[in-house]
Image (cartoon, rainbow, N blue to C red):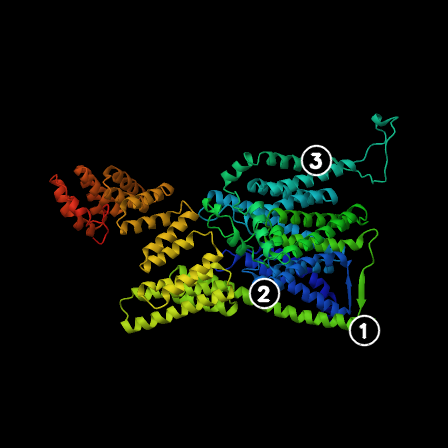
């Protein structure tokens, strides 16, 4: 009984809140489940959200049981919430759907929900961490997590180098490899600050130096310029600071008789080790900065660790922002809407690059992206928060440093970490874990302000001594507690929906339509989204194709099943357009559903498909794929003239769009315009010199225009690229025979016959004639073989 009382007495909700917050960061960072049905980043964000809500629960229960609440200086906390407030106002007045603004697709960084989450994380850190022991718990555990992360990353790189089929060298447990590089930079900076500011035992010093070394190893593999710059700046600052505080011997002969300038700056005894660490770090950083395009690039190439980190440029980001501000300057386009604005206003010149079909969802950096989506309010909110943070930070570190050396270290490292993440957020897009670490550091820094020399008194309320105010606070805390329950339910439900969606996608890819349909229905039940409805529509299309090719079904049964699948697909695609009307992919999916049944001459199918595609083109006007798809629709509708217009539009948007050029040549062949078709096909071959299908088409058209030598060249290249290409070999034999090279023609037909018994039977009569030195392919037979003739259409 006494043991039970001791355990009860030992437990406190305050301690539970502290551990909950610390463990949340640790688990969210390390969570890595290599499964195709477990969403990687969304799992981390969900764990982060649930951990924050659990911490908030413990904090509320602690306040209710203690009957009091104490908060640190609130000005900086208030400035912190300016950014979520700007996101909320943008959500209300930009016209974006609230669910999209809050959750986006996967609770991405540029959403109201994520901004509330990291602001709440920072606020809880400011409220929960109050004692030196709590700081030590946090930095101790995060140090262990950092060690584990760096070691695992090095193992991934080594395994990827020697077993690339098992794991990629750029695999990272924190997000992208760029995120890992940014975390490594933070590890190097934190290690340098720790060596300089904390008295460590020999073992701990060895551990910290090892962490710094591992961090530099990962940075060398990633070769990220901005991270190297920030590490170099911190190393330089620490080196200068160490020099400035270095103890000068009183009996220095060089200073004898010299009048020296003195100030009230503290003079510390700085060891050679304190000077060596930042100096070595600075030298390494400068080495890799200078050699970033040579040595650094070569290391990344050899190890296969060049991070694929492609984002719009500053100019492209400003271009999108200028269009948004022209129509909605105050509140921007709305949270999580940069991708839509990118598609609407991007430069069509990007179609000439390898990134022509990349739908970017963010700009050059996280904060510039936020400027576009939240407008002037967002700009003012970010600037206000950053200005307040810098003012209080520099003031605390320069003029109001805590007396306790460890708390002084906490203040310094938390300020530096937060500033590091904020700077990276301007020039890059850190992942959710990096942003969480940055904002929890903001909270810890706010917490440390209570220890400053001239710190203001903390503000607090004892509920029993202020009944009216206490009642209001208790009532609000109770409502907040109920909100935590609801929020937890929503996050769990959406996560289950994401898992079900991944299961459905995998099942559809494997051709398991029934399993895919069941999983999709679960995804829609848990978290209705346009992506889930898109998947349902795709399953319906696959089912219609399956029914159409099933010869075992009775005609009436097949018709009934086909109509049901068509109806379900149309309904799902239509619902996707209702949930996200500004997502061009939803309209493209709806168009594809109707396009599937256009050859069946179903009333309204062509018109509805055309309307849906037109809406998709309006939302993404510079995408060359959409006019190409509409051209296919026009061909299915028997309107080649309109199809040609759309193909020319597609080629105008992307000059090297091979599929559109190739399809244009086929239309021209069908209309008897062989020479025009040849020009189009040769243009396609120019942009796709290693595409056997395009080369085959070029060979056919050259044969039709009398260029046998050119045909031989094209067919031979197609066969070289694909030795199993029977049609290319057969027509290569035709071209050889036309030139009188019967032996070469016979060799090609023998190869064709060896590919299958059916082929052997088909080419045997031609082979007999070739053995007799006769041409089995006279001009009268070429048209029957499908070789286009100038001025003669296929129908003649």
Location of the N terminus by quadrant is bottom right
Which residue shows up at 56% across the image and 57% down it? 337
Mark yes or no: residue 711 visible.
Answer: yes
Query: Looking at the rendering, which quadrant does residue 52 occupy?
Result: bottom right
The answer to which of 374 and 473 lies nearer the viewer is 374
Task: Classify residue 33 as left or right of residue 693.
Answer: right
Q: Callout 2 environment at 10 Å: few (<14), some (14 to 19), or many (20+)?
A: some
Against 236, is 546 above or below? below
Q: Mark 3 highlights which residue? A: 276
Mark nearest the camera among 1 and 3 is 1
Q: Earlier in the sequence, mark 3 or mark 2?
A: 2
Q: Which residue is mark 2?
A: 98
- Which labelled disc corresponds to residue 583? none
| Residue identified by numbered label 1 | 467
Element carrying mark 1: helix
Examine the rendered structure and indicate whether residue 617 appears above or below residue 768: below
Query: At which x and y percent is residue 179?
Result: 58, 49
Q: CA distance from mark 3 to mark 2?
A: 54 Å
Residue at horizontal 16%, vertical 50%? 761
Which secondary structure, mark 2? helix
The residue closer to the viewer here, 659 or 391, is 659
Q: Is residue 670 above or below residue 238?
A: below
Q: Do the residues bearing badges 3 and 2 touch, measured as CB atoms within 8 Å?
A: no
The numbered mark, 1 or 2, whose residue comes first in the sequence reads: 2
Q: CA distance from mark 1 to mark 2?
A: 37 Å
């Amino acid at each position: 009984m006494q043991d039970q009382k001791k355990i009860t007495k030992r437990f406190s909700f305050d301690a539970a809140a502290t551990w909950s917050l610390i463990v949340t960061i640790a688990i969210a960072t390390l969570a890595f489940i290599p499964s195709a049905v477990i969403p990687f980043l969304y799992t981390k964000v969900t764990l982060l959200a649930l951990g924050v809500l659990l911490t908030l629960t413990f904090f509320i229960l602690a306040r209710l049981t203690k009957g009091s609440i104490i908060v640190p200086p609130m000005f900086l906390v208030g400035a912190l919430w300016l950014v979520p407030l700007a996101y909320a106002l943008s959500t209300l007045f930009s016209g974006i759907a609230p669910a999209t603004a809050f959750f986006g697709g996967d609770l991405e960084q540029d959403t109201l929900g994520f901004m509330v989450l990291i602001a709440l994380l920072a606020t809880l850190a400011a409220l929960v961490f109050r004692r030196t022991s709590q700081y030590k718990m946090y930095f101790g555990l995060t140090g262990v997590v950092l060690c584990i992360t760096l070691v695992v990353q090095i193992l991934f790189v080594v395994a990827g180098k020697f077993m690339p089929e098992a794991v990629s060298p750029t695999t990272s447990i924190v997000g992208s490899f760029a995120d890992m590089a940014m975390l490594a930079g933070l590890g190097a900076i934190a290690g340098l600050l720790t060596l300089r500011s904390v008295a460590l035992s020999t073992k701990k010093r060895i551990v910290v130096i090892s962490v710094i070394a591992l961090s530099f190893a990962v940075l060398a593999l990633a070769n990220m310029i901005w991270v190297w710059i920030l590490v170099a700046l911190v190393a330089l600052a620490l080196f200068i600071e160490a020099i400035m505080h270095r103890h000068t011997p009183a009996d220095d002969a060089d200073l004898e008789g010299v009048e020296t300038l003195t100030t009230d700056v503290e003079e510390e005894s700085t060891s050679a080790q304190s000077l060596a660490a930042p100096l070595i770090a600075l030298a390494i950083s400068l080495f890799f900065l200078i050699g970033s395009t040579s040595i650094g690039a070569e290391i990344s190439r050899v190890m296969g660790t060049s991070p694929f980190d492609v984002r719009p440029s500053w100019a492209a980001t400003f271009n999108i922002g200028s269009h948004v501000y022209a129509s909605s300057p105050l509140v921007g386009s709305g949270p999580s809407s940069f991708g839509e604005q990118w598609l609407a206003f991007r430069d069509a010149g990007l179609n000439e690059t390898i990134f022509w079909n990349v739908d970017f969802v963010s700009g050059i950096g996280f904060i510039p992206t936020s400027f576009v989506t939240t407008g002037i309010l967002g700009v003012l909110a970010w600037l206000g928060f950053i200005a307040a943070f810098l003012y209080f930070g520099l003031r605390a570190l320069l003029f109001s440093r805590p007396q306790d050396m460890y708390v002084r270290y906490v203040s310094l490292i938390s300020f530096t970490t937060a500033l590091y993440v904020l700077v990276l957020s301007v020039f890059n897009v850190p992942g959710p874990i990096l942003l969480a670490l940055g904002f929890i550091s903001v909270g810890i820094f706010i917490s440390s302000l209570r220890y400053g020399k001239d710190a203001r008194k903390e503000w607090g309320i004892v509920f029993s001594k202020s009944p009216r105010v206490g009642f209001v606070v208790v009532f609000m805390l109770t409502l907040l507690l109920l909100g935590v329950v609801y929020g937890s339910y929503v996050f769990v439900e959406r996560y289950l929906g994401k898992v079900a969606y991944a299961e459905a996608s995998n099942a559809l890819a494997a051709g398991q339509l029934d399993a895919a349909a069941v999983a999709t229905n679960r995804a829609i039940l848990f978290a209705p989204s346009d992506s889930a409805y898109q998947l349902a529509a795709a399953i319906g299309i696959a089912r219609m194709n399956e029914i159409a090719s099933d010869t075992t079904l009775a005609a009436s049964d097949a018709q009934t099943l086909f109509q049901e699948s068509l109806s379900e697909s149309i309904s799902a695609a239509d619902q996707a357009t209702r949930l996200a009307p500004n997502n061009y992919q939803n309209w493209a999916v709806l168009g594809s559903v109707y396009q599937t049944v256009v050859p069946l001459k179903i009333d309204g199918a062509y018109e509805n498909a055309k309307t849906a595609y037109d809406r998709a083109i309006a939302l993404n006007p510079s995408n060359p794929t959409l006019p190409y798809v509409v051209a296919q629709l026009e061909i299915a509708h028997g309107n080649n003239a309109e199809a040609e217009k759309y193909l020319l539009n597609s080629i105008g948007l992307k000059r090297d769009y091979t599929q559109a050029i190739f399809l244009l040549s086929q239309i021209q062949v069908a209309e008897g315009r062989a020479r025009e078709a040849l020009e189009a096909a040769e243009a396609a071959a120019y942009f796709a010199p290693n595409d056997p299908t395009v080369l085959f088409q070029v060979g056919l058209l050259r044969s039709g225009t009398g260029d046998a030598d050119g045909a031989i060249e094209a067919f031979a290249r197609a066969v070289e690229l694909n030795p199993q290409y029977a049609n290319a070999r057969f027509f290569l034999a035709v071209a050889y025979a036309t030139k009188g090279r019967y032996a070469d023609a016979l060799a090609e037909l023998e190869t064709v016959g060896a590919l299958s018994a059916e082929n052997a039977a088909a080419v045997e009569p031609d082979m007999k004639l070739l053995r007799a030195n006769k041409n089995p392919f006279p001009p009268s037979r070429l048209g029957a073989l499908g070789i286009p003739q100038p001025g003669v259409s296929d129908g003649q």
